[in-house]
Amino acid sequence: MNRFRACVIVLALALTAACSRTDGEGPAIHEVWIPMEDGVRLAADIYFPDAQGGADLYPVLLEYLPYRKDESRARNYSLYKYFLDHGYAVARVDMRGTGNSGGVTIPYEYSDIELDDGEVVIDWLSRQEWSTGKVGMFGISWGGFNSIQMAMRNPPAMKAFVAVMATEYLYQEDVHYMDGIMHTDSWMMSNDLYNALPGAPDFIMDEEWLENRFNQKPSVYTYMRQQRDGPWWDRASAKGQYDKIRVPGFHIGGWYDGYRNSLPRMLEHVKTPVKAMIGPWDHYFPHNAWPEPRVEWRHEAVRWFDHFLKDIDTGILDEPKFAVYVRNYYPPDPQTERIPGKWRWEDGWPIERIEKQEWFAHANNELSTKASELDTHTMDYKPSTGLEGGGPTMWWGSITPDQQPMDDYSLVYDSGALTEQIEILGRPVAKLNVSADASRANWVVRISDVAPDGQVTQVGGAAFNGTHRNSARDPEDIVPNDVFPLEIQLHFTSWVFPEGHKIRIAISNSMWPMLWPTHTPFTSTLQIGGATGARIELPVVPIGEERAPDFKDPVITERIPGYETLDAGNITGYAAITEIRADPETGEAYGFATNSGATRYPWGIERFEEEIEHRISDVNPANTSVIGRYALIQELDDRTLRFEQDVSFTSDEEKFYLKFDRRVLVDGELTGENQWDEVIERDFQ
């Protein structure tokens, strides 16, 4: 394995070592150590435009992640090559205690430790002899989140950022409490195990590794003790404090990504230059996204960075601020490869020409633009419903299946067949007056397109924790049978309802397994008609003159040799659930989410296996559970390492029970194990 460590040179700063490394015939990768103020060193790969460094000065783009840079080199080079070809150096830095960086593993996402280190990294990059002193940040998901968060800190050398598939509102829009309701998924099962691994390619398993990584308490425990909104979430959330952002930002989202709500908020509230693009994509960079059509977003990113890091007037600030992919109808199929639609420029957000159009629920379950007669509709809570609403990967993203099975257990209101098409763009608002004969209840509202053949395609939706009706920071029990108002803002959406189709609104009290159920059976009511009857406000776009952006087609870069995907796993990258079954012995509903994959690296093969079992009882929803089993296998020349993590998360009426069991096996022999087992009070969940 020493053949991968080519040489060591001394850079300008003391304590900073570097080497030029190439895997096979691939590009030279300059490995450096970046010293933190407490003496810990972060591992970084520096990619230069000529692949060898040199005397020229370059502005630097930073991607700052915990996702193990050495294993990511094929992905990284393919991603960065476009920027290299346009005169940028790119730095990929492993966070503290992850990948090949030193120190104790970061305690959780977006901690002060992570962001403090990030400021040091940006300063270090700006002061290198090959740097112009100007730094930009970019990234997807975690790397998009912390780009926004670093912009809130405004480091002097940080001149611009591009955030892809990210949000600035951590509590209700990250993966822990979607819409204020507890959520569990594949990420919860796997992230802490990845961070517990020693660095590649040597995988040194010594006492320092045990103390700093393997034996560190899983971050999930921290999130589970923060069940309501408040200061802990505010620390890294820009929502409500947009004035802190003084670094120009370009925000890119997807209609099938769960973080898309941030785009209109950023356009509306951030005062420094801001631009946004939203396309028909899941949680991917747009140049290699699913579903299609794809675009070369890096061309737009280079224009953005050129303006702020190279002082080149690219004209990007003269264009409209917002590029929107307008979605047309398609049948509900999670395997859909291409979303029909078109690109359109919008000047920003809010859009002045959008008309708010109210549609009212009627006593006969119709939906129209006229108010209804008075009535009250009731619904029995069926906790096990909701798979179709959340889709296979269980969030407000990805492509969902036909909604009819969930609608069968919802209050449903259909319009007549439309006599002309209706386009919506924005966040529909459901205005309800409801009650429940229990102290805890959630509401879920979905809007769908019903085709003439009866297929039901989800257009948008949102959930609401009833105990948050006055405040998500200070929840209150529901007073049984008291009627109260709810105003539920659905997630950002675009859709053109064709002539002859129907608009459907479906209201329910559960979306399991995406959202953790409330603990007791109940019956809820919905007021119909009059001044307080159920209605939904649609953001309708009138037909008019349009302008369209002209995006470039993606540029494909050859991956560097030595890295090969043997099994890509599920198309979304996460364990997916497609079916709920009934257990004849217990009466419970259950479902399995599974995924597996394998990658070849220059030093060996990595495999992963995951299986998540969800269980719930309609009779006693307090006793809900999710059991996860995750394994990472490293097949090396001299040994085989197997890292395992079993997670058990269960509940009763008052408490959650969270248990982690982490193991490592060398050539099949157990050599290390740790367990964590805690009881956590339910806090209005």
Image: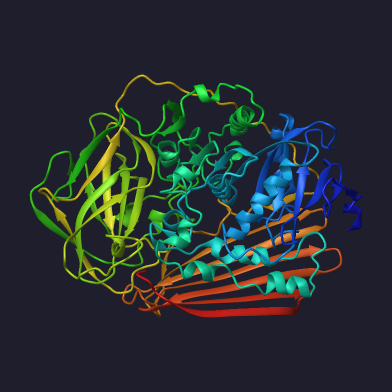
Q: Position of residue 683 (x, y in %)?
A: 38, 71
Q: Which quadrant does the C terminus fall into?
A: bottom left
**Residue 681 appears left or right of 275:** left
Residue 623 to residue 302: above or below = below
Residue 316 to residue 205: above or below = above
Front residue of 366/17: it is 17
Front residue of 414/321: it is 321
Q: How many marks?
A: 0
One can see residue 394 in this view: no
One can see residue 663 in this view: yes
Q: Which quadrant does the N terminus fall into?
A: bottom right
Residue drawn at (74%, 75%) of the image: 665
Q: Position of residue 505 (x, y in %)?
A: 26, 48
Indicate the quadrant where residue 158 lies.
top right
**Residue 397 appears left or right of 452:** right
Residue drawn at (72%, 41%) of the image: 126
Report the colour scheme: rainbow
Q: Position of residue 66 (x, y in %)?
A: 66, 56
Residue 617 to residue 333: above or below = below
Report the residue that reaches farthest toward the left. 373
Q: Position of residue 600 (x, y in %)?
A: 76, 54
Front residue of 644/570: it is 644
Residue drawn at (51%, 80%) of the image: 678
Front residue of 441/317: it is 317
